[in-house]
Each structure stands twice: as structure tokens, then as C-alpha cells.
């Protein structure tokens, strides 16, 4: 049996990745401090298959709690929504810097493959669209989003240096607007915001004029890309965008949410937050070429599954 470590494995994307790893025959060690995750997301797995370790990966790791061999380390630990990374700004900086170093050191010690979960926020408010991996970005290094943006960029730099200096077999994946079941309803991102508001019959909160764009990738597609990146050889040092290249304005997305909910569209305008990106769209040429991957789940299908999950979370 192969062994994997997933930091942040009790979170949204992390728990879905754990599901996939278990289905592929892995035993999984999950390191999570539950700052934004929950063990409930892993309740379907027995302890002998998924080993739950309560730990802040920014602190030194207890290597005795890990197995004698590790095949792959997935570093997903980090708050990912503006609500959480502003609430945990210093912690976000640390988990994406010191936490990344600890995860890289573990992979190096075990000669394991390493995957860094990075973000489209590495591109900041881009001046190029769609964004290819070769684009260096347009980021405010000291703004209110920098605790996330810049720490992720540092994590990428550190990972790239471990490839150059130590020959580590590491890959960097930049995620674009992933959504689906197990998202937290109050995490402040547009999908849970809109779905929660639609279910409550409330106006959908739209920041700015609503013409800023996003690209929405359903979580099963995201996890399939992570899996392919983990099992594909000869990718050391590669940076790969993972997302859906179908670009939508926020107003267009609000229309889609209202249609799925079966309610008339009513919006409540709010000021655009500082440094909020005006466009977000991945160039996934590398994912198609290197991984043979592209999204399979359409927005309507993904939203229906997301609505079903949030309805199931309602106390009523």
C-alpha cells in the first residue's frame, strides 16, 4: 500500500483529495489544525485508512507520527478565502512559508513526490488574460490581500528552489475558483455567498459593477487534476494552472445561480474590496498537454450538486 501525507486534508479541497487517494488504494496521513477545516469532512473513512493528526504544520513536525515511508506529500494547508485569511493573516503567512518548508523537508527526507497547492492569486490583478503560467503577475506586495497572495508566491519560490538545489520531484498547481460540496457557507467567496443567499431568498451581494470575471471549476475536476499531477512522471519544477477556462462575469454567474434556485435575480451592490482582481481566467494549455486534463463538469451540473449540499446543511 502506498502512503500519502495531505496537509489541510480536513478542508474543502483537501478532504475531496483524501477521498480520491483512498479510492486509489492509499493510506493517508492528514495534518490539520482545523482552523478552517473539520474532521466531519473525513467521517466516511476509518481510522486505519485515514490517520488524523491535529497539528499546525507551521510548527515543527512530529515525524514519529508519520509512517516509515511516504510516497507523496500534498501541501494544501492554508486559509483560502478573504474572510479567513484576513482573520488569520499572520497564520496564513506562516503556513505558506514555514509550513511549506516543513512539508518540503518531509518530502525531501522521505524522497517523496511533492505537490504544492498554489493559487491564481499569484497573478494578482492581472494585465494579461487568460493567464498563462509564464505570466509573472501584478500583485500589491503590502495590500490587504498580500498575506495570502505574497505568501503563496513565496511558497512557489521555495518549492522551485528545492527542485533546483536538492533535486526534489516537486510540482506547483495554481488553483482557480474551485467550488462544490464541503465549502463553508460563511467563508465569503462568491459561490457559497450566492448559494446561501439564494436559498434564503435574499438578494445576491455583488461587489463593484459585477463585470469582473471569474472561472469556476467543480471540485471533482480539480481533484482529478491533482491526482494526474501526482502520478505523472517528469514534471519536476512544472507550474500548472488548474481551472475552468470558461470565463464569466459575476453578474452572469449571479443569473446562473438564480436560475438554478428558481428565483428572480435581485442583487445588492457593495463597493469593490481593495485589490480585488478584475479578471480571472486560466490558460490550461499545459494541463491539457502534460496531464491530459480539462474540466468535465458544467456549471449547471456543479451548481445543482452544490445547492443540494447546502440544502442538506440547513438546520431546517
Image (cartoon, grey):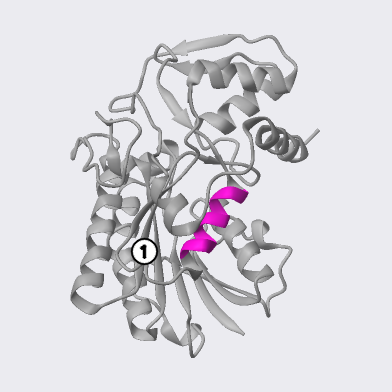
Quadrant location of residue 213?
Answer: top left
Name the residue rendered at 66%, 33% in the picture.
303
* Residue 149 lies within the magenta run: no
Q: Residue at x 56, y 35 (%)?
A: 186
Left or right of residue 286: residue 294? right
* 69 relative position to 277: left or right: right
Q: Looking at the rendering, in which quadrant would you find the C terminus?
A: top right
Assess disc 1: are there few (<14), some (14-19) or many (≥20) residues with their C-alpha within 10 Å of its C-alpha. Answer: many
**Which residue in the rendered view is the most extreme toward the bottom?**
68
Q: Which of these two is toward me, 174 or 65?
A: 174
The answer to which image quadrant residue 162 occupies is bottom left
Q: Measuring from the top left, give residue 83's x and y in whole percent.
A: 43, 36
Between residue 130 and residue 196, name the one nearer to us: 130
Looking at the image, residue 222 sits to the left or right of residue 181; the answer is: left
Q: In terms of depth relative to the viewer, which is nearer, 80 or 3? A: 3
Q: What element carries label 1?
A: strand
Front in this rendered view, residue 163 or 43: 163
Q: Position of residue 61 (x, y in %)?
A: 38, 77
Q: Position of residue 218 (x, y in %)?
A: 59, 42
Measuring 37% from the left and 78% from the top, which residue is drawn there? 106
Main SS of the magenta segment? helix
Residue 33 visible somewhere in the drawing: no
Image coordinates of residue 195 in percent, x first then y, are: 64, 28
Q: Which residue lies furthest to the right in this view?
A: 316
Return the residue at label 1.
171
| Span highlighted in magenta in the image | 220-229
Amino acid at each position: 500500500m502506498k502512503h500519502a501525507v495531505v496537509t489541510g486534508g480536513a478542508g474543502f479541497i483537501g478532504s475531496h483529495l483524501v477521498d480520491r487517494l483512498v479510492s486509489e488504494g492509499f493510506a493517508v496521513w492528514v495534518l490539520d489544525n482545523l482552523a478552517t477545516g473539520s474532521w466531519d469532512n473525513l467521517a466516511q473513512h476509518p481510522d486505519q485508512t485515514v490517520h488524523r493528526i491535529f497539528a499546525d504544520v507551521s510548527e515543527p513536525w512530529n515525524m514519529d507520527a508519520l509512517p516509515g515511508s511516504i510516497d507523496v506529500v500534498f501541501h494544501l494547508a492554508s486559509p483560502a478565502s478573504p474572510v479567513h485569511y484576513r482573520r488569520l493573516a499572520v497564520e496564513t503567512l506562516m503556513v505558506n512559508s514555514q509550513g511549506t518548508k516543513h512539508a518540503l523537508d518531509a518530502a525531501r527526507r522521505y524522497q517523496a513526490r511533492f505537490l504544492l497547492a498554489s493559487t491564481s492569486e499569484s497573478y494578482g490583478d492581472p494585465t494579461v488574460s487568460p493567464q498563462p503560467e509564464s505570466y509573472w503577475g501584478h500583485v500589491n506586495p503590502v495590500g490587504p490581500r498580500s498575506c495570502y497572495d505574497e505568501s503563496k508566491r513565496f511558497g512557489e519560490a521555495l518549492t522551485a528552489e528545492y527542485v533546483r538545489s536538492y533535486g526534489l520531484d516537486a510540482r506547483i498547481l495554481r488553483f482557480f475558483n474551485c467550488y462544490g460540496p464541503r465549502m463553508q457557507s460563511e467563508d465569503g467567496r462568491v459561490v457559497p455567498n450566492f448559494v446561501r443567499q439564494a436559498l434564503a431568498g435574499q438578494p445576491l451581494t455583488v461587489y463593484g459593477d459585477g463585470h469582473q470575471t471569474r472561472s469556476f471549476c467543480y471540485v471533482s475536476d480539480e481533484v482529478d487534476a491533482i491526482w494526474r499531477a501526482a502520478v505523472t512522471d517528469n514534471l519536476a519544477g512544472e507550474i500548472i494552472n488548474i481551472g475552468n477556462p470558461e470565463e464569466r462575469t459575476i453578474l452572469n454567474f449571479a443569473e446562473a445561480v438564480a436560475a438554478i434556485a428558481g428565483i428572480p435575480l435581485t442583487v445588492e451592490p457593495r463597493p469593490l474590496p481593495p485589490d480585488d482582481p478584475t479578471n480571472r481566467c486560466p490558460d490550461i494549455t499545459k494541463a491539457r498537454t502534460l496531464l491530459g486534463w480539462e474540466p468535465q463538469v458544467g456549471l449547471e451540473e456543479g451548481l445543482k450538486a452544490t445547492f443540494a449540499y447546502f440544502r442538506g446543511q440547513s438546520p431546517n
